[in-house]
Image (cartoon, coloured by chain):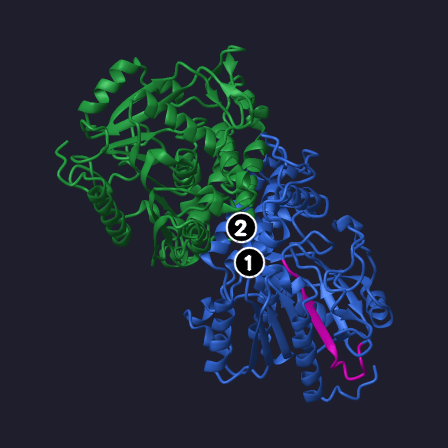
Chain colours: A green, B blue
Amino acid sequence: MSSAATKMTSRTSEKTAAETFGASHVFESSSPLDLDSGSSLFPFRIAYNTYGRLNQDRSNAILVCHALTMDQHVANPNPVTGKPGWWQSLIGPGKTIDTNKFFVICSNVVGGCMGSTGPADINPETGRPYALSFPVITIGDMVRAQAMLLDHLEIPDLFCVLGGSMGGMMVLQWCVAYKDRVFSALPIATGARHSAQNIAFHEVGRQAIMADQDWHGGAYQSHDTRPSKGLAVARMAAHITYLSEPALHTKFGRNLQDRDKVTFGFDADFQIESYLRHQGFTFVDRFDANSYLYITRAMDYFDLSADYSGQLANAFKDSKTRFCVVSFTSDWLFPTPESRRIVKALNAVAADVSFVEIESDKGHDAFLLEEPELFATVGGFIHSAAEARGLGQVTP
Amino acid sequence: MSSAATKMTSRTSEKTAAETFGASHVFESSSPLDLDSGSSLFPFRIAYNTYGRLNQDRSNAILVCHALTMDQHVANPNPVTGKPGWWQSLIGPGKTIDTNKFFVICSNVVGGCMGSTGPADINPETGRPYALSFPVITIGDMVRAQAMLLDHLEIPDLFCVLGGSMGGMMVLQWCVAYKDRVFSALPIATGARHSAQNIAFHEVGRQAIMADQDWHGGAYQSHDTRPSKGLAVARMAAHITYLSEPALHTKFGRNLQDRDKVTFGFDADFQIESYLRHQGFTFVDRFDANSYLYITRAMDYFDLSADYSGQLANAFKDSKTRFCVVSFTSDWLFPTPESRRIVKALNAVAADVSFVEIESDKGHDAFLLEEPELFATVGGFIHSAAEARGLGQVTP
């Protein structure tokens, strides 16, 4: 929740960033965030974590973009859940993304609920929580806020920007909106647009939240309630899309939960039911329902080709970025054809792109798991890009 | 709703059955329905429609089993929605299933809400609606009730039993529980068990209903409310699984609904959102929320191999039934491997089985649509089975 975010001056936060691992900072912007909707957001702040040290050339920065329900705690234990950072196995000292060598930044998206300005914050115009008076934001807005953060950190360009799912959308947006500021990019398990089926699943989740009587038209904070049941249902529906059918079959099948036979009732007889309920009910403790509405909406609106008459290739024209596009065979939320579409567009403008489809039965969630082939792909790509940028001998 | 069901004596209904097309009848059983849970249901009634005439040998009866949210109005306009019967294009005079030749029966499942006894009915023990005091029923129970209906109609065996989705489960159950009463069987777009992913989607739907404050622990009738929002969300989630991703892409893509650009809000900007909302909100007018809980639960519990130590083939041992198993390439709710599993089991016991996988981009819903290849398959199979049964020259 935003109220829990550490407040500090920009100067302090910048200094700390260079000196500690996994330090939490807050960037309070002195200028408004211009939004794609035509409105703007001010004041606004971005909560972010940093790992490792920025080198003297300021050329070793890696920006990690998080997925829908993730946050800035990418490589340190999450202070809310106590669980390891969501890519802690990938990023850290001596790890695939080596924080002894690179300066890693991960920021909570604007609209989120882990410290960056979002709908749960106070609307300065009314003195009450924004709720639905928060402006609808886009992936473009999220990335624009990140660019302002980088300006503040005086980082002219990124050695690499990477992320999966919505994070991958942000990676692509970076490569289009800030062509000259991205040396290399790793969009993983993502797409250049949100598909009709994905919009459909998001809409189900939003309707579940809005159907909850405790939602109160978004103003649940003022009513001292939370639409927990609706948010749990939204999470359950979404969670199914993160797993593959084979993974569900292997992991749960029709196994019963702590019983020998079905109870002929509506308890969670099956392990899959118990698992989903758990996913739903734990989610509501760490996520804000209105943020869920806003962030899903941002994903729905994402269509990188929209400003280019539907010609995705034109979005990437003159790109100098080195791309590595990654998909997973059993991912049905962002299936391989969505990645191929990106690769095809990049190839059409002779961009520097490699493509890896990783064999996995773990579905969309594979990008968050310890998939050796993913780690090898990311490691190989980063290593080669670092050499190309002359970072090989850098001792940060 | 049950209260709307026509009440008539068994004798009258039987007589009418033989004489009219699409007549609605009610079978009031004089004995209880023994349930798989160990309890029993009494009194109980089954609402059913008939089409065509039973021949003198009583050998031309076709039983059609309906899917989760369908009903007995298979080949006549639905009295609730005013829409054509759900297989009216397939079944009727001179159609693929020719009611000039066959006597077609379609009954509402027990637990349903279109005239057969279900949770919305009065529990004779309390004088109040059953709600959650209604016993949990299974596919086996639904079929046992149908067998009692056939006994009442004095139909010793069925020329054919067919159905899609849950209807296909019932077809398979018939072929196992009443081996000698089924001459031919057409299980379409179905499986011999409900998969973990399918249980998961059902659980999301049930949780959405139960999360609705108007559900009142199932006792919404006593509170004069209906959990319409929760039921609509359940329907929306389920509806996504009935369509294929390619069909959604082709039909809706990212097209906007009655607008040139997105509104930066939570209205139904996209056609797919508008379509889903419509599906949800029209569904609640024709379906009972508790029936939805009970029928989804029956599907979850379905595993034909459970009584045979997990050996599906053993369930079909000594079967004399002629089978035609049908699947659709883009059906991801009951994908082709589920049908292959049935075919493999039938082959293992040397049953008479043919298998057709139909190329279609319409997903699970294909079985309800005018798919020429489906009609040709059904027509060819029925024709050949009729010849084998000596029904070729029958003039009913």
Q: Over which residues does the magenta segment extend?
A: B54-67
A347 sits to left or right of A312 = left
Compared to A1, does B243 lie above or below?
below
Q: Which mark is residue B299?
A: 1
Q: Is residue A144 magenta?
A: no
Using a 10 Å C-alpha cutoff, classify the residue at mark 1 as few (fewer than 14 neighbours), some (14 to 19) or many (20 or more): many
> Taking the image as drawn, is residue A265 in sight?
no
Main secondary structure found in the magenta portion: loop
Are the residues under marks 2 and 1 on the same chain?
A: yes
Along the viewing direction, whichever of B319 and A223 lies nearer the viewer: A223
**Residue type marked 1:** Met
Compared to A288, does B32 lie above or below?
below
Q: CA distance from mark 2 to mark 1?
A: 9 Å
Quarter-of-image position of residue A14: top left
- Find residue A189 and report its horizontal and vertical position in percent: 39, 48
**Residue for badge 2:** B202
Mark 1 chain: B
Q: Are marks 2 and 1 in contact (CB under 8 Å)?
A: yes
